[in-house]
Amino acid sequence: MVALLALRRGAGAAGRRWFVLLPPLLLALLLARPAGALVEGLYCGMRDCYEVLGVSRTAGKAEIARAYRQLARRYHPDRYRPEPGDEGPEWTLQSAEEAFLLVATAYETLKDEETRKDYDYMLDHPEEYYSHYYHYYSRRLAPKVDVRIVILVSVSAISLFQFFSWWNSYDKAISYLATVPKYRIQAMEIAKQQGLLRKAKEKGRSKKSKEEIRDEEENIIKNIIKSKIDIKGGYQKPQIRDLLLFQILLAPVNLCSYIVWYCRWIYNFNIKGKEYGEEERLYIIRKSMKMSKSQFDSLEDHQKETFLKRELWIKENYEVYKQEQEEELKKKLANDARWKRYRRWMKHEGPRRLTFVDD
């Protein structure tokens, strides 16, 4: 019994020693590297690319290209004929194809200066096993086209799409305003004062049809609306500086401008304690309302004047204004027929029941 316990204790101690030695052994196996400089699967495999082409390590590009052409003509599968040095049962058409591929691989390795530099480094530093794998596959898998060109083309395409999309929205806004009586009448009066409509009719009496004259008058009205009305917000006239391409190019300038503006803000209002001007007050109000600059600019002037009169740049005043707006919205929804119908449906029918309502 004592011998059995001693045996079990010995086995347990041996198991613990193996458990302690296991991580270093696994690490040693993981970091094990081949002793030779040539590695199977990299470049010419276990063959030296210089020996494959029959040139020295100091050979120039012309000598390497000349050796490649000679060997390629010799081992090309369509032109291969056994030569005195190739006699033997091991030299077949398949072996000639393999030799041709090996010659081509050696030439592809040595003709490029960067790849040749990596290969020479592998021959001189065989101990850096994983580094050679990284350099080899990073060059093989690298995109053939410059990434900078791809990014430039993509950004340019997005910018063109932005410009035409914004211009289409702007044209739709002008076409809509041309149908609004208020703006159309004013534009026609301006056109009559400038004699544009009379000139269009005089030019079109002999050459143009009524439809063409009507289209020309419509274009005149639209051009007057474009020149007299400043559309803001999402339908404003597209500006080149707002495109993605120009925003990226101007990003350093905009960043420096923002840093200068922010430092001035801290110095003037936080350190010196100056009072906010109208522009600064509107900026604080816009930030409190979480509106973009284009959204805030699209508001009417009387709305901005109301914001300033109520001093909404002060946090407490803005909280009161926000609460009033929420209460007003609740009253509007309470008096809205569609909202009442929806609340009745949610109360009696519920969202789980499928109903069909004809409006």
Image: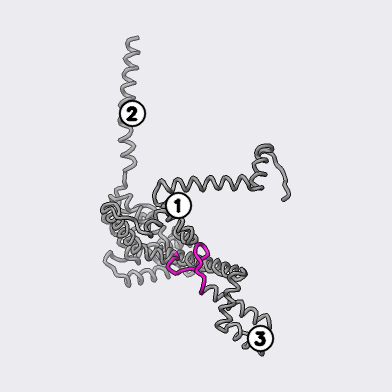
For the residue pair 51 and 174, the one nearer the viewer reads as 174
Q: Where does residue 146 sit, x and y in percent of width and height?
A: 40, 65
> SS of the residue at dot 3?
loop
Alpha carbon distance from label 1 to label 3: 53 Å
Where's residue 223, x and y in %?
Answer: 55, 76
| Residue at the top extreme, as displayed | 1
Q: Vertical placement of 269 versus 219: above or below? A: above
Amino acid bearing label 1: Lys
Mark toward the start of the polypeptide (2 vs 3): 2
In which quadrant is the N terminus drawn? Answer: top left
Q: Amino acid at mark 3?
A: Lys
Q: Which mark is residue 19?
A: 2
Q: Sequence order check: which comes first, mark 1 or mark 3?
A: 3
Mark 3, other Cα within 10 Å: few <14 / some 14–19 / many ≥20: some
Residue 300 versus residue 271 in the image, above or below: below
Instruction: Report which residue position mark 1 lands on.
Output: 290
Magenta-colored span:
227-243
User: In the image, what residue type sits under mark 2?
Assistant: Phe
Residue that badge 3 annotates: 208
Q: Nearer the viewer, mark 1 or mark 3?
A: 1
Sequence order check, earlier mark of 1 and 2: 2
Q: Residues within 10 Å of mark 2 (few under 14, many from 20)?
A: few
Secondary structure category for the residue under label 1: loop
Say which of 230 and 146 sits in front.
230
* Color style of the picture: one colour
The image shows residue 71 at horizontal and vertical percentages of: 39, 68
**How far apart are the alpha carbons under marks 1 and 2?**
61 Å
Residue 107 visible in the displayed image: no
